[in-house]
Image: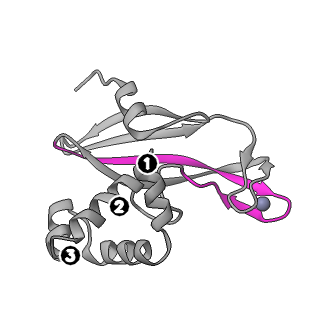
């Protein structure tokens, strides 16, 4: 596949400035990798919200909802905030809960599946480790219901 419409992915992923899709790659005819970068400049501290200088970038990866038959992955060079009060911290990705290996939409799908299927079945369907799914779903149930309500409302 040589031509990919980036706008399709921009719209479905809600990628907004200062983030942008730098490239889209198809790997082994099974996976689409959406590479995201951030514009140069100030970043926002994930703890206090202050605008700070950028102290560099850290590469992060999130599993997203499949796109047709392709397993979809977002890979982003996340800016590191250099906050005078909080220290150096990796900025939050708007598409995922802090620390999760999955996008918010992928986690929502898992939560929906959990109501009607065994975790082992879900792990087989989405091709992800059962232990990681269990950890993610437990953290959702305990701490982040409001995050998911916001994600659904988008
Ligand atoms: Zn701060």
* Residue ranking furthest to the right: 84
Query: Counting residues from the N terminus, which is met first, the one under dot 2 or under dot 1?
Result: 2
Residue 153's mark?
1
The one of 42 and 47 positioned closer to us in this rendering? 47
In the image, is residue 105 part of the stretch drawn in magenta?
A: no
Whether 78 is among the magenta residues is yes
Q: Which residue is mark 2?
A: 107
- Image: magenta residue range: 69-93
At 31% from the left and 25% from the top, the residue drawn is 4
What residue is drawn where x is 59% and y is 55%?
Answer: 92
Residue drawn 15% across and 67% down?
124
Q: Is residue 110 above or below residue 20?
A: below
Picture quarter with ligand 1: bottom right
Label 3 environment density (alpha carbons within 10 Å; few <14, some 14–19, many ≥20) = some
Q: Is residue 51 above or below residue 125?
A: above
Q: Against 59, is 124 above or below?
A: below
Is the residue marked 3 within 8 Å of ligand 1, measured from its CB? Answer: no
* 85 lies left or right of 153: right
Q: Position of residue 102 (x, y in %)?
A: 39, 59
Of circles 2 and 1, which is in front? 1
Q: Which residue is mark 3?
A: 119
**Relative horizontal placement of residue 121, taking residue 40 as reference (left or right):** left
Please identify, in this view, whether the residue under mark 3 or under mark 1 is nearer the observer.
1
| Whole-number angstrom distance, CA of label 3 to CA of label 2 | 13 Å
**Residue drawn where x is 48% and y is 54% of the image:** 150
Label 3, label 1: how far apart the Cα atoms are: 26 Å
Q: Where's residue 66, x and y in %?
A: 24, 47
The x and y percentages for residue 19 are 56, 37
Q: Is mark 1 within 8 Å of ligand 1?
A: no
Q: Horizontally, is 55 left or right of 6 in the view?
A: right
């Amino acid at each position: 596949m040589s031509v990919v419409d980036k706008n399709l992915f921009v719209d479905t992923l809600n990628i907004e400035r200062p983030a942008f899709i730098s490239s889209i790659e198809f790997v082994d005819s099974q996976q689409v990798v959406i590479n995201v970068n951030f514009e140069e400049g100030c970043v926002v501290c994930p703890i206090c919200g202050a605008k700070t200088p950028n102290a560099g970038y850290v590469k992060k990866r999130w599993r997203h909802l499949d796109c047709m038959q392709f397993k979809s992955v977002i890979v982003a060079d996340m800016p590191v905030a250099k906050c005078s009060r909080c220290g150096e911290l990796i900025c939050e990705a708007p598409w995922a809960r802090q620390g999760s290996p999955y996008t918010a939409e992928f986690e929502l799908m898992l939560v929906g599946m959990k109501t009607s299927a065994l975790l082992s079945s879900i792990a087989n369907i989405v091709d992800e480790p059962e232990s990681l799914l269990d950890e993610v779903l437990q953290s959702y149930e305990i701490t982040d219901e409001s995050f998911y309500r916001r994600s659904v409302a988008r």
